[in-house]
Image (cartoon, grey):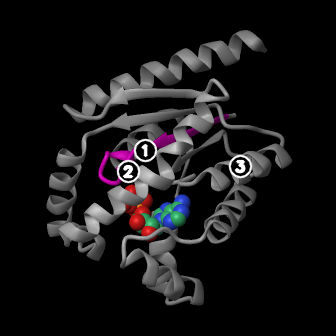
Amino acid sequence: MLNIVLFGPPGAGKGTQSQKLIDKYNLIHLSTGDLLRSEIAAGTKLGLEAKKLMDNGLLVPDEVVIGMIENKVKEHRRAGGFIFDGFPRTVPQAQGLDKLLQDNGTEISCMIALRVDDEELTKRLLLRGKTSGRPDDQNEELIRKRVQEYNTKTAPVADYYAGQGKYFSVDGIGDIEEIFKDLCQKIDALKEKQEEKK
Ligand code: ADP
């Protein structure tokens, strides 16, 4: 299986690139942000609780997102692989994911990070807020809070995968197609290695 963690701060382009990667490699896209927003739209108890945190730029508790991901992984037992987008966002989430995949007889193949600086992120998110209708993209203070949450809680997740020799990164600024090409290059190199091992 090809299980990719697509990593990077809010606004790095994970959603855009995930869409292109799932088409090319036939993977299932699991975005905790999207899953949480559907819970909110459906007005579930989980959604109501999550909304309070999301509206303040804060992370939702680890157990909540791990539980959601677990359900989805089990729903797609026969998938060729997954792209995890916006997850894991903390080291305990990464540990939870490792355990969950191990229990299902598979593992993370790699983490690929999109490198984008803070100024560019703020610009992109404010622009996205104009059209996406996402409340968390319409307020500069909230955006800064999310980037701060990322820098303190999420950035260490990269070290977690680096420690397993699974971390790669590409430049996330520039042409969408160029960035996609760079991502594919990393993935194809990895797939070749996986094939050799077989
Ligand atoms: P972005 O990364 O572009 O800000 P997402 O759609 O990935 O947007 O997430 C939006 C919000 O949902 C986050 O700010 C956070 O409050 C919540 N969230 C999403 N994924 C997670 C996660 N894995 N753990 C905790 N909270 C999460």
Badge 1 crowding class, 10 Å Cα cut-off, few under 14, some 14 to 19, many 20 or more, is: many
Q: Say what secondary structure mark 3 lies in.
A: helix
The magenta stretch is 2-15
Quick check: marks 2 and 1 in contact, CB under 8 Å?
yes
Circle 1: residue type: Ser
Seen at 37% across and 36% down, the residue is: 114
Q: Quadrant of the C terminus?
A: top right
Badge 3 crowding class, 10 Å Cα cut-off, few under 14, some 14 to 19, many 20 or more, is: some
- Asked if residue 184 lies left or right of residue 162, the reply is left
Seen at 49% across and 51% down, the residue is: 154
Q: Earlier in the sequence, mark 3 or mark 1?
A: 1
Circle 3: residue type: Gln
Would residue 11 be counted in the magenta stretch?
Answer: yes
Residue 32 in sight here: no
Would residue 104 be counted in the magenta stretch?
Answer: no
Which image quadrant is residue 190 in?
Answer: top right
Q: Earlier in the sequence, mark 2 or mark 3?
A: 2
Residue denoted by label 1:
18
Name, please, the residue furthest toward the front.
152
Residue denoted by label 3:
95
**Quadrant where ligand 1 appears:** bottom left
Residue denoted by label 2:
15
Using the image, tell me which numbered label, if any, was put on residue 195. none
